[in-house]
Amino acid sequence: MRNRYALRRALLVLFIAIGAVTLGHAEVVIANPGLADHEALSYTETIDALSRPFEVTLTLNPAAPARYEYHSVGADLESTYRLDPATLLSLSSDSTTRGPDATVLRTADYRNLKVKPGKDDLLVTDMGSLPAVLRGFPWGKATFAKILYVGNTSYAGSAIAFELQVEGRQSIAAAGRTWDCWHLTTGLGGALGLVLAKTEWWFAVEGTHPLIKTSGPLGGPGSPTRTLLLQNYVVGR
């Protein structure tokens, strides 16, 4: 009887250990943290020494199928991302870029996604939606993710992998107060990650984790740094 009892305990411990390993290395799941039906966020966008307003709204459109519309307006870029209200995955988007030589309109509609996220994977369809998507990150539970980016590919089954690393918590002064923030970085990993600059993000620890600040390169090596810093945050209409 004692041997049988000891065997049962050993098997139970083994199953728990296997389950813990499996859960600890599962797909990184984004979930709506309880976003309001409407939010307005005002930022200062600084590129090199030039600072300009950058306005953002996040609005729930209840018309079937329901979507969150993440709309941003800057000096030369206006974008709208339509997000799944539960997973915050961008399902379609429109963006208008106004340059000195041309105005470019880009639209995207993501269908038949064949990428199957694996261990530590975080599926993202549009990098421009990250300020909204990462509000649903499992803060305090996950510290690392491989971002599977399926945008700008010739077919949905191909993905480019980036890395996300939670660096810890930092205090950021913005919008007339000091915010306790989750600090994270995104960028390429491996040898390229040691050479190319990463983008830094600071999301509020409190509430539904609005983006307080972000700073990173606009493009490849030698490109200017773009920084967004929150100036005003209003929940509700």
Image: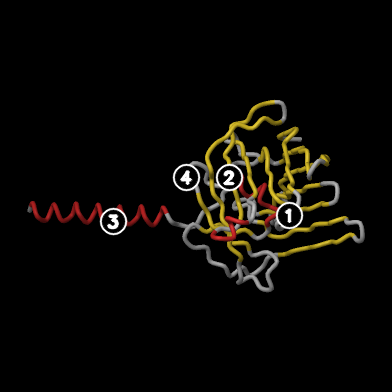
Task: Point out residue 65 in the picture as x, y percentages from the top left corner.
Answer: 69, 56
Residue 15's tag is: 3
Left or right placement of residue 36 versus residue 77 in this view: left
Separation of marks 2 and 3 at Cα, in angstroms: 33 Å
Task: Point out residue 87 in the picture as x, y percentages from the top left corner.
Answer: 59, 53
Separation of marks 4 and 2 at Cα, in angstroms: 14 Å
Q: Nearer the viewer, residue 190 or 79?
A: 190
Residue drawn 60% across the image and 41% down it: 34
Which callout, 3 or 1, points to the residue nearer the camera?
1
Residue 104's tag is: none
Separation of marks 4 and 3 at Cα, in angstroms: 21 Å
Which of marks 2 and 1 precedes in the sequence? Answer: 2
Which of marks 3 and 2 precedes in the sequence? Answer: 3
Left or right placement of residue 1 versus residue 42 in this view: left
Disc 4 marks a residue whose amino acid type is Lys
Which of marks 3 and 4 precedes in the sequence? Answer: 3
Which callout, 1 or 4, points to the residue nearer the camera?
1
Q: Residues within 10 Å of mark 1 (few under 14, many from 20)?
A: few
Disc 2 marks a residue whose amino acid type is Leu
Q: Nearer the viewer, residue 7 or 85?
A: 7
Task: Point out residue 35 in the picture as x, y percentages from the top left corner.
Answer: 64, 41
Task: Point out residue 37 in the picture as x, y percentages from the top left corner.
Answer: 70, 41
Disc 1 marks a residue whose amino acid type is Gly
Q: Report the residue marked by disc 1.
A: 222
Which of marks 2 and 4 precedes in the sequence? Answer: 4
Q: Report the residue marked by disc 4.
A: 141
Separation of marks 3 and 1 at Cα, in angstroms: 51 Å
Q: Report the residue marked by disc 2.
A: 184
Q: Is residue 39 above or below residue 115?
A: above
In which quadrant of the rendered image does the C terminus lie? top right
